[in-house]
Amino acid sequence: MIKTKIEEKLREAFKPAHLEVVNESFMHNVPSGSESHFKVVIVSGAFDNQRLLTRHRAVNQVLSEELQNDIHALAMHTYTESEWNGLNGQAPVSPPCHGGSKND
């Protein structure tokens, strides 16, 4: 499973205090059971003193093989522990798909 591989790689690379990997493929016009659209919420001390772009590049690098071969879309929410605590442990909800939704 791609979701499991993503979780394993991110845990190894970032030693997160909190990690959520959500398969959001069901929200898109893809076959049932697809693993192509993901949301990642990761809270790590590795992000301390890093700009958002640097954090996202680091995640992209760790998941480069999956992004090249398996993942069509990846929403990233990368936080330091203090940022996460300031959000009361709540990541943004993904918006509905506007590009070929199953409901169209």
Image (cartoon, rainbow, N blue to C red):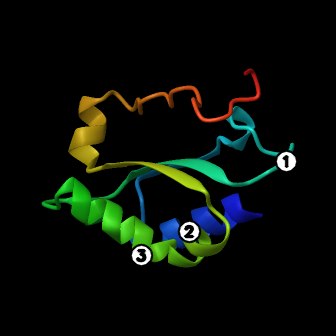
First in sequence: mark 3 vs mark 2? 3
| Corner quadrant of residue 91 | top left
The CA distance from mark 1 to mark 3 is 26 Å
- Residue 83: give x, y in percent of width and height: 23, 40
Residue at mark 1: 33
Residue at mark 3: 61
- Identified by mark 1, the residue type is Gly
Neighbours of disc 3 within 10 Å: few (<14), some (14-19), many (20+): few
Q: Secondary structure at mark 1?
A: loop
Q: Which image quarter is the N terminus in? A: bottom right
Q: Is residue 49 above or below residue 89?
A: below
Q: Secondary structure at mark 3?
A: helix
- Identified by mark 3, the residue type is Gln
Query: Circles 1 and 3: CB distance less than 8 Å?
Result: no
Horizontally, is 6 left or right of 31 in the view? Answer: left
- Identified by mark 2, the residue type is Leu
First in sequence: mark 1 vs mark 2? 1
- Residue 59: give x, y in percent of width and height: 41, 66
